[in-house]
Structures are given as C-alpha cells and as structure tokens.
Image (cartoon, grey):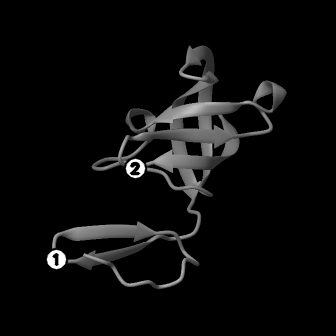
Amino acid sequence: MVKGVVKFYKVEKGWGAISSDALPAAADAWVHFSVIEGTGYRELAAGDVVEFDFEAVEQDSFRFRATRVKRLRGGPAPTLRRRGDEVRIEPEGVPDTPLVP
C-alpha cells in the first residue's frame, strides 16, 4: 500500500480522487466508496490521509484506480447544518451563513 491524500470526494456520487507521489507522472487515482475499508456508510473527505492499493486502468479521465483504501487520518471536519428538511454540509472554515429556504 502507498500513502496519499484525498484530493476531492463527491459524497452524493460516492467517488473521488486520491493524490500520491507514488503515482507516475503526478496523476491521481479514482476511488469508489466500495473499496474503502470499513462497515456501514463509507466515505472520504478532501484532506484525508489514506493508504491505498491501485491499478493502471482507464477510469473516466483517470489513468489509475484505487482497489483498496484505508483511511489513516481525517482532514478538516465538515459542519452539518439542518433547517427543516434541508441539510447542508460545509467544510471547516466556511463562514456561518444562514440557510435560505
């Protein structure tokens, strides 16, 4: 396994990208929630430090795909805000703004 950092992760779609010096030509690896170790709902967040295995493939615009991912350390914790049926997740450091109906 090699170490990397989650570049971005689309929670609503269940996939993202991992950056690592171990990947050739400064490429990123595509990651899907199904390869994240753990039970229950599995997700990553930008800035998470991970260990991962990967393979060379054509996956969307990526040349590499993570085949197993273990989260080592989390990035900034998001803030979950609710108002009625609306939910918004804000990254840490985003100014506290009211939800507009």
Along the polypeptide, which appears first: circle 2 or circle 1?
A: 2
Q: Position of residue 29 (x, y in %)?
A: 62, 31
| Residue depicted at x 35% and y 47% | 12
Pick whichever, 7 or 2, lies toward us.
7
Q: Which residue type does callout 2 highlight?
A: Val
**Residue 44 relative to residue 13: left or right:** right
Q: Secondary structure at mark 1?
A: loop
Q: Position of residue 47 (x, y in %)?
A: 62, 58
**Residue 72 relative to residue 90: left or right:** right
Count the labels in the image.
Answer: 2
| Residue depicted at x 70% and y 43% | 3
For disc 1, the neighbor class at 10 Å (few under 14, some 14 to 19, many from 20) is: few
Q: Position of residue 85 (x, y in %)?
A: 16, 70
State which quadrant residue 53 falls in.
top right
For disc 2, the neighbor class at 10 Å (few under 14, some 14 to 19, many from 20) is: few
- Marks 2/1 in contact by CB < 8 Å: the verdict is no
Q: Quadrant of the C terminus?
A: bottom left
Q: Which disc, if any, is residue 84? A: 1
Q: Quadrant of the N terminus?
A: top right
Q: Is residue 100 above or below residue 23?
A: below
Pick whichever, 97 or 33, lies toward us.
97
Q: Secondary structure at mark 2?
A: loop
Q: Which disc, if any, is residue 11? A: 2
Q: Foreground mark, 2 or 1?
A: 1
| Residue depicted at x 50% and y 71% | 77
